[in-house]
Amino acid sequence: MEEAIRLAASVPGLNAVELNFPQHLALLSRDALRSVLAETGLAVTALNLRYEGAMFANGAFTSPNPAARDSAIATAIEAVDIAVQLGADHVILWMADDGGDYPMQVDYQTLWRDEIAGFRQVALHNPSVRVSVEYKAVDPRRQALIRSMGEAMLAVRDVDLPNFGVTLDLCHSLMAGEHPAAAAALAVRDGKLFGVHLNDGYGVADDGLMVGTVRPLQLVELLLTLRDGGFSGTYYFDTFPIREDPVAECAFNIETMELLFDRLDHVDLTAVREAQARHDAVSALRVLRAAGLV
């Protein structure tokens, strides 16, 4: 774990990490983690919840086993406390097994009630820590409970707490059949987009490919939407360098983002908005072409 953090620190331009909880924190002591973070200069900006093992196979916050639900909520609350200790103000809940696989397997009203109750309990624990749900349509469950930005925003409405919001993962958005920029706009307008996980893919599975390699124009539109909406959170790379060197792969992601941010500075936003007011795709795309983005 310490070596992984040192490798991350060797990536030019990388200044933070987000750790999986409890898995990564189980691999080294809290003092050892603080030491290697101080050594490398990396900040921790969030903890990502990962529920694994037989106890959570039928769900975490929506498990039919009350002991499993209590354990899942307690783990998330522990993550909130540890995030504060590490200087982070964000805990991301990916409820991987909350959902079902077969028709008639679950009662959807009960699942929703239990999910919202769990979210509220975690968010209420410390109002200074942002808590967000990271939605995903399928995988590992065939039907996740919170599959889209619309459902995530419905959860935000039902939780009804200032520190509860949404994390958008680009591949997850594509898997849900969404247009990522349109999905982001739903959360940005209410100040409820707390995190962005960038990657790329073909929309069928959670490909986790390098940023901007498959759908570059959709990435550009997403970044413009985030900039226009005042998003100031972390851009986190949720990519899977299975065959690529992870340091080189992450460096490529950062180089891509720096290039895009530079070119976005030269986009005539007034001209874009005028074209959009007419629903004029050709003119809007020509503005992006003039900035070297198309």
Image (tube, grey):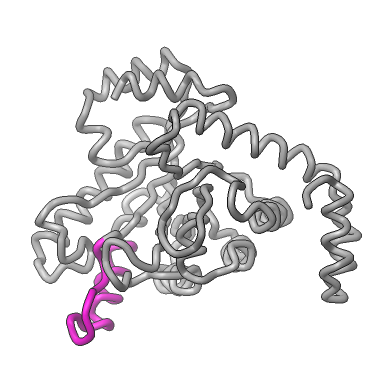
Viewer-proximal residue, 289 or 45? 289
Q: Position of residue 260 (x, y in %)?
A: 71, 42
Q: Which residue ends up furthest to the bottom in the rendered image?
A: 104
Question: Residue 53, relative to residue 262: is it above or below?
Answer: below
Query: Which residue is depicted at the point 57% across and 37% down?
Result: 253
211 displayed left or right of 225? left
**Residue 293 is inside the magenta segment:** no
Residue 141 to residue 249: above or below = below
Magenta extent: 97-120
> Is 109 inside the magenta-drawn segment?
yes
What residue appears at the point 49 percent right and 41 percent down from the top-left corner? 237
Q: Position of residue 103 (x, y in %)?
A: 23, 85
**Does residue 222 appear left or right of residue 101 in this picture?**
right
**Picture quadrant of residue 2:** top left
Return the residue found at the far top: 39
Q: Which residue is at a point 31% across and 55% down the rendered structure image?
A: 122
Question: Residue 138: image x %, image y %?
Answer: 34, 67
